[in-house]
């Protein structure tokens, strides 16, 4: 039993999960070829209708218990998926059997028992803005009131620091190009010194540690866009692909 969260990106409006041990294809695969592979259980292709990033949550031999919110809908059928090598890969389908992966990495792989699997698909129907707001509210609770106030204050300081750094770079460039001499040079030096001081001050006050805690809580609180439940089964099983715009969910 295991659970994996994968940040899947796609430039062809299709994400999925497949056996990472399949041999690379000698030519690019069209949508029809992807769907043919999916029908054979080599791939579960999910046509999203839009490019972008999708948070996938994969449950292997363990149930997904939908939260009270956001609402999840379940596809009305299951799909067969063969993961014979024991190495699964989830991500953008443009990398399915690609000899030169463009959008997936080693972080998108995970190990399973070599087997056929029954796959159940759940879709998060809540608007992403609502998800994001709710996740930030949950992440804020991971810090005390004092820590949260300090984290936000230091975040503003970092943004100011970035603006000052940009001004320093622009001033140095102006000094070189316009040969403005000591005045501009001194101004650049003062700005650079102020930038360094602010950076050290923020670092000393522990912004990085607070950011790690907040970000971990934010990641944990962010609900997935798509949940896949995988259960070992006797095969072969009929596979298939999903078009989210046309699929029937319950």
Image (tube, rainbow, N blue to C red):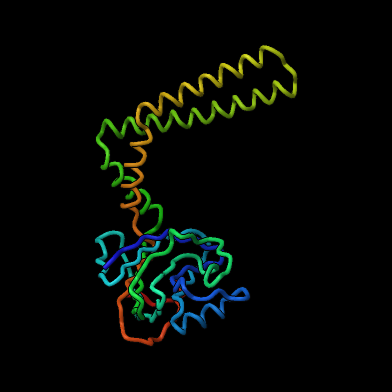
Identify the residue at image location x=41%, y=70%.
Answer: 87
Question: Residue at (24%, 35%) from the top-left corner?
Answer: 144
| Front position in the image: 208 or 70 | 208
Instruction: Find residue 2 and report its image quarter.
Output: bottom left
Q: Position of residue 247 (x, y in %)?
A: 42, 76
**Is residue 82 shown left or right of residue 98?**
left
> Looking at the image, which residue is at 43% across and 71% down?
17
Q: Residue furthest right?
A: 178
Image vertical order of residue 177 relative to residue 240, above or below: above
Figure quadrant of residue 191: top right
* Residue at (44, 28) in percent of width and height: 157
Residue 246 in view here: no
Left or right: where 91 falls relative to 28: left
- Which image quarter is the N terminus in? bottom left
Instruction: Indicate left or right for 19 with 97 as reference.
Output: left
- Residue 87 at least partly seen: yes
State the residue in front, 107 or 68.
107
- Above or below, 74 against 139 in this view is below
> In this rendering, is residue 104 above or below 153?
below
Image coordinates for residue 243, horizontal then vertical, percent: 47, 74
The quarter of the image holding the C terminus is bottom left
In which image quadrant can residue 18 be found?
bottom left
What is the count of numbered marks? 0
The picture places residue 95, in percent across and down from the top left corner, at: 53, 67
């Amino acid at each position: 039993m295991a659970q994996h969260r994968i940040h899947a990106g796609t430039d062809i409006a299709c994400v999925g999960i497949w056996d990472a041990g399949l041999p690379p294809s000698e030519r690019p695969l069209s949508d029809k070829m992807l769907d043919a592979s999916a029908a054979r259980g080599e791939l579960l292709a999910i046509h999203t209708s839009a490019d972008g990033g999708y948070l996938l949550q994969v449950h292997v031999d363990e149930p997904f218990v939908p939260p009270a919110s956001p609402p999840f809908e379940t596809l009305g059928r299951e799909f067969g998926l063969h993961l014979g090598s024991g190495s699964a890969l989830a991500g953008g389908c443009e990398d399915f059997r690609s000899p030169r992966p463009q959008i997936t990495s080693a972080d998108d792989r995970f190990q399973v028992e070599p087997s056929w699997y029954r796959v159940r698909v759940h879709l998060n129907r809540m608007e992403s803005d609502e998800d994001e707001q709710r996740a930030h509210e949950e992440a804020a609770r991971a810090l005390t009131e004092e820590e949260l106030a300090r984290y936000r204050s230091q975040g503003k300081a970092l943004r100011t620091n970035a603006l000052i750094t940009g001004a320093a770079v622009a001033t140095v460039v102006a000094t070189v190009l316009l040969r403005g001499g000591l005045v501009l040079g001194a101004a650049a030096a003062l700005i650079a010194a102020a930038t360094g001081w602010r950076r050290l001050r923020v670092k000393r006050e522990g912004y990085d540690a607070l950011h790690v805690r907040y970000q971990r809580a934010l990641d944990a609180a962010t609900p997935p866009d798509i949940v896949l439940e995988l259960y070992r089964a006797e095969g072969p099983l009929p596979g298939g692909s999903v078009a989210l715009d046309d699929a029937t969910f319950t």
